[in-house]
Amino acid sequence: MKRFTGLAATIICASVALMEVTAQCEPDTVNCQDIGDPGQICPRNLPDGTVDVAYDESITVLAPPTFDYQGTLIDVAYIIVDSVLNLPPGIGYLASAEKFYPDSAYCIQVSGTPEEEGDYPLSIYVTPFINYLGSIIQGPQILDSTSVVMTVHGTSSIDPFKVDDFQVLPIYPNPFSEVARIGFYTPFDDRISLKVYNILGELMHEETQGSPPGEHFFHFDGNELLPGTYFYRITNRSQFYTGKFIKSR
């Protein structure tokens, strides 16, 4: 985890306006431990959301005692998140405290109902307050454009009249340029396999994942494929489904 900009990527909580109301959550101090690199967050990645499906997650944050400012380690008194931009519409953030003090655990409640599907890279404005010669002064505001992304999927395509059956969901997007999301629904614990073939029938990719009952996704990275038509096969313990998708560029 990075010293400061990495922390900004992790404490994705409400803007100052939202922090007037604190989250009703508890930090997970059992499973979330500082591994020695300043600051820690658990879990490291936000779970995916689905349009029109209620979303509620709790994130634990351990604030760092220092940050690296132009090559110099500076003691942190506390940190405030000024604003978070490019949030998924319908999602809000509440923190358990307005200020994040070093060597303490905090939690952030992430909740709402996503309204639009897509990938949302977060841009976070952070202001540190630092200990300088015995006084606490406000440091420079920093814009942290991070690689942290919250993904919101489209409305579930599960047939409600076939919840006892294995189902493969429509691939998205199709055509795709980099990553295609291939979903499925399983009514029982199973091992699900994905195979991707070119038009000559040559196997280009294969992976398997164990899946409990529910809706799940393969995130197929096709960056190394040439543009063209490909076929995918989803297989469970007793049946398979084959579909077609197109790599656009």
Image (tube, rainbow, N blue to C red):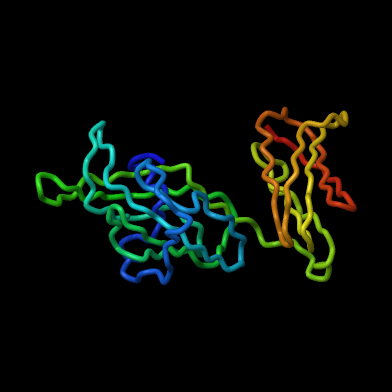
Query: Would you say 145 lies left or right of 16 here?
Result: right
Q: Quadrant of residue 227?
A: top right
* Residue shown at 43% from the left, 43% from the top: 146
Taking depth in this image into account, of 192 and 33 the one nearest to the observer is: 33
Image vertical order of residue 105 relative to residue 141, above or below: below
Count of numbered circles in the view: 0
Tell me what residue is drawn at x 61 percent, y 67 percent.
53
Q: Position of residue 37 (x, y in %)?
A: 37, 41
View extreme (right): residue: 238
Q: Residue furthest front?
A: 30
Say whether residue 72 is left or right of residue 236: left
Nearest the viewer among 166 and 82 is 166
Closest to the observer, 55 or 230: 55
> In the rendering, at what x and y percent does residue 83 appear?
35, 55
User: Residue 85 in the image: x percent, y percent?
Assistant: 41, 53
Specify the quadrant that holds the N terminus: top left
- Name the quarter where the C terminus is drawn: top right
Give the residue at x 37% y 64%: 95
| Vertical order, 194 against 228 (above or below) | below
Q: Quadrant of residue 194?
A: top right
Q: Is residue 12 left or right of residue 197?
A: left
